[in-house]
Image (cartoon, grey):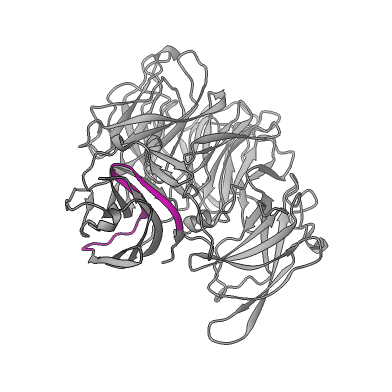
Amino acid sequence: MTPCGACRDRWGASMTGVRGLAGLLLLSTVACSSKLALDVRLIEALRPDPFEDVATVRLRALEGGRLVRVGEGRWDQGPLDLDTLVSPEADRFVVEGLSSDGRVVSSGASGPLDLLTAPPEDGLEIVFTRVGVLSVLEEADTERIGGRAVELPGGGVLVAGGVDADGCAREDTEIYSMEGARLERGPPLVGGRVDDFHLLALGDGRSIVVGGRAANGCGAAQDTDRVVVFDGRSARNVEAVGFNIPGASYAVVASSEIVAAGGEGDIVSRTQVARLDLASGAVRSIGTLDAPRAWASPAVISSGRIALLGGRAQRDPATALDSTSVFVPSRGAALDERIGLGRALVAPATRRTAAGGVVYAGGRSRTGEGHAEVRMLVVKTERDFPLGDSTVVTSISSTIADGRFVDVGDGSALLLSRERRAAYWTQLLPRRARALDTEGAALIGGGRLADGRVVLRSEAGAYLSFNPGLSPLGIAARDGRLAVDEGEVLDGVGVGVVPLRPDAWQLTTEGLVVTRPDALEGEVVPNEWAVFVGDDALDFDLELDVRLEPRARAAVLFGLSDQRFDHVVLGGQISAHRQDTTLDCPPVDAPVLEVSGFHRVRVVRSGERVTVAIDGATRFECVLRSPRVGRVALGGISGSATFDRVTRSAP
């Protein structure tokens, strides 16, 4: 392809432009033979060069849960005129740069599309970057030291707070939008916000700033009770007297309710838990913790419970805690049992996985040093004993005292360390953490866009992008569907899968394997599972290979939400019910499952009806009494099971 000079200044003089995919698609409509010409242009990063080592460019469309090849050609020999009919139901396009040996070295994707009712008038612009590395999108001399960033729904990142190069509070905010890959001015933050403040997403499109101190420009910073609510381009102040508590753990429990647990006291940490009603500004006490705890990291887990990881009991760093307390807002109290963290940690980075586990990393020890491990905490239901446990996921190449996770959306996450000027790509399947080249930038945070990329902001003013690789399963999972390309076999199901307990699962050359049968204690109810990441779905068509060891049982879970689910048991003759699960479908007691080797299993759900077929033969159909929307997962019940080759799925 030749450079598209007319698009060079799309982001302004300091930004990159388009190297040049001027691809032409011809799209048929539903009711007639007319065609729509669609121009697809690639916006490339400043560095590294996404076209390095690229021999050909391939264009694919996501149609009904499948990635369908549109066309392919050399990028350096002029625009690609792809005279191909594409279904008007295509809701996403994917561009991949292939090396001479067929490897995908660069890629990009559009956001969700509606070609029938709202076709893009000026064509599509797709950001095209290298896979598996940080790419610089924009550089500007606008320092924001100590700022925060949060992901916005629909594809965007809001950046707020911090100070400029002169130490003056930044009272402006920034929004990086996927539409046109542009940087915009966000709502004002009067007085700015510095020190120990939090920028949190409310889950309904709004976000809030709470805690910390405010200042008028370069004036002295002072404590403030003001909570700022951002809604689009507007900001609203809420006076929340007594809710600014240094060292408190802030958690969003509902779209208009925030909880603050513990915090610093004069000598001993606090135990009080307060709730803020954003609608009225009222702050009221809702209970107490089981023990003093400050600088703990919160994670909202199943049933609205709040896990408080680590922290310290007093101001003395030597009182750092090595346990997790689980607070139940509806009770106003913490559970009696605590869960060990494996070591004492103050303010570790945390994130909740789609399977319900809590990944944590970094944090300060009792001597003030950082840690070099990524671990996972599993909290079960209140009737389970023990309540939960923790396990080591992987190690990183340096210790981290501070740290922030940014979800990548395919079961992995970026772990950022501002003090180390470092970033790690952490994954659960396989378990690993790979260091990324930050070019010495101190990254304050970011979020995931609708096209699958993660955008990060540095303190110096640069915006960077991380492209995890837009695999078929990864893209479909983000849209709530499982899919692979027509005729393409995905060996192993690591992309888009998150295990509840990573030490019980392993991704091998044979697929996803239960490696710790001793961790699976149920008879017909899965205690461990691996979730296909994505939005909740009702109907699905899942086809995969399953191999059961002798006397092993496996399951396909669906409607999974908050540890509640429906499921189909593969193998076994017992039917059972549990409070948080239903078993309307009888276990598949098929003798063929006892034959060694893999068996092709297809599970289809359409409304209330579930159909299971093994090796091409329908085994049974059943009707769900109360079908629920949720995620789809693979589960282990007893013994060892292997899942492989997810090759089909579409609602």
Q: Does residue 518 appear to the left or right of 471 in the view shown?
A: left
The residue located at (23%, 62%) in the rendering is 626
Position above or below: 303 against 541? above
Q: Which residue is drawn at the image coordinates 39% and 64% (left, top)?
A: 541
Give the x, y percent position of residue 434.
58, 35
The boundaries of the magenta stretch are 624-646
The part of the image, by quadrant, that contains residue 289 is: top left
Count every numbered label the image shows and give the total.
0
Q: Is residue 30 left or right of residue 306?
A: right
The answer to whether residue 554 is seen in the rendering is: yes
Left or right relative to 544: residue 4: right
- Of residues 119 and 341, the one nearer the viewer is 341
Q: Position of residue 495 (x, y in %)?
A: 50, 49
Give the residue at x 76% y 58%.
18
627 magenta-colored? yes
The location of residue 438, given as percent across then percent down, is 67, 35
Q: In the rendered image, which quarter is residue 32 located in?
A: bottom right
Give the overall secondary structure of the magenta segment: strand
Q: Quadrant of residue 140?
A: top right
Q: Residue at x 75, y 50 (%)?
A: 53
Asked whether residue 444 is drawn in magenta, I would say: no
Q: Looking at the picture, how far across and down is residue 363, in whole percent?
A: 48, 24
Q: Which is nearer the eye, 411 or 121? A: 411
Residue 173 visible here: no
